[in-house]
């Protein structure tokens, strides 16, 4: 039977916080809004941009959220042109090795990210990872996390039963999205949300290093109802 591991990107596979914080700083400066604290900025990573800006500035109107989201896109585009953006984000230790290991073991691999499609494609292309993933979902393809749409789209595209799929991510949004779609959920401790928040959102396990992922996946799928 097919088994599917669905990965978040920012905070799970790659540490993109420096680029995200730089783009947030540039975006807020461009529209004349005060920059929220660092923990607030990292706390919304994983949401699609309009939803992220609404969470950061709930006192503002929808038009302001969309304006800030566009300013963020432009700031990130400038970073990319200067050699930053997806080009300058490091993979977490063991991430690439874990992907190769799971692929060799017969797991289907997919991505569900709040990144825009352009940014996701660019990241996969520059790191030569396109061939590993049988399906990818971005902020342009489905409603923002924690809505289950991204995972549901991946399940339809691959034909894998929800109980044979696991969402792996660093945020409560990832855990809630996976569980809402009927899939398993494994959190990672090195990302942008604290471990207790991951469990509160439905994580079945939280791992502290990629070396533990293989056994964690086997455990979650084995315990899923038939």
Image (cartoon, helix red, strand yellow):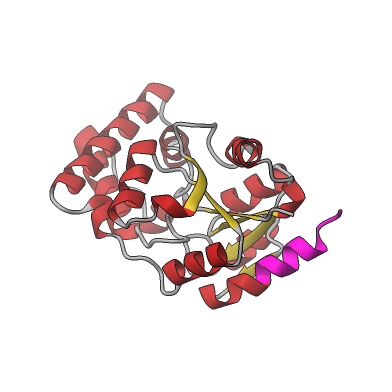
In the image: residue 168, left or right of residue 140: right
Residue 41 or 13: which is nearer the viewer? Answer: 13
Single out the residue that lies furthest toward the left: 82
Where does residue 157 sit, x and y in percent of width and height?
60, 37
Residue 225 belongs to magenta span:
yes
In the image: residue 114, left or right of residue 198: left
Where does residue 22 sit, x and y in percent of width and height?
25, 52
Where does residue 102 sit, x and y in percent of width and height?
56, 65
Residue 19 or 30: which is nearer the viewer? Answer: 19
Main secondary-structure element of the magenta-colored stretch = helix
Residue 20 belongs to magenta span:
no
Q: Which residues are magenta?
A: 216-226
Residue sitting at x 41%, y 43%: 115
Q: Quadrant of the N terminus?
A: bottom right
In the image: residue 139, left or right of residue 118: right
Compared to residue 186, the image places residue 58 above or below, namely above
Residue sitting at x 39%, y 61%: 14
Residue sitting at x 69%, y 45%: 160
Residue 194 seen in the figure: no
Residue sitting at x 25%, y 43%: 76
Where does residue 195 sit, x and y in percent of width and height?
59, 67
Residue 106 or 175: which is nearer the viewer? Answer: 106
Compared to residue 195, the image places residue 6 above or below, namely above
Residue 25 seen in the figure: yes
């Amino acid at each position: 039977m097919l088994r599917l591991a669905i990965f978040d990107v920012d905070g799970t596979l790659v540490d993109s916080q420096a680029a995200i914080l730089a783009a947030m700083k540039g975006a807020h400066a461009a529209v004349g809004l005060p920059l929220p604290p660092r923990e607030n900025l990292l706390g919304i990573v994983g949401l699609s941009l309009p939803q992220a800006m609404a969470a950061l500035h709930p006192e503002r109107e929808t038009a302001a959220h969309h304006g800030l989201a566009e300013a963020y896109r432009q700031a990130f585009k400038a970073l990319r042109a200067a050699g930053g953006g997806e080009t300058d984000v490091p993979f977490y230790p063991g991430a690439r090795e874990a992907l190769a290991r799971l692929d060799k073991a017969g797991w289907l691999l997919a991505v569900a990210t709040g990144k825009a499609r352009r940014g996701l494609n660019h990241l996969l292309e520059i790191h030569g990872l396109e061939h590993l993933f049988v399906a990818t979902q971005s902020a342009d393809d489905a409603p923002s996390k924690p809505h289950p749409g991204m995972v549901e789209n991946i399940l339809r595209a691959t034909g894998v039963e929800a109980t044979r799929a696991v969402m792996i991510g660093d945020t409560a949004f990832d855990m809630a999205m996976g569980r809402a779609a009927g899939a398993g959920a494994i959190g990672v401790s090195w990302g942008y949300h604290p471990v207790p928040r991951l469990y509160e959102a439905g994580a079945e396990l939280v791992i502290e290093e990629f070396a533990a992922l293989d056994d964690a996946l086997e455990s979650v799928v084995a315990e899923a109802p038939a």
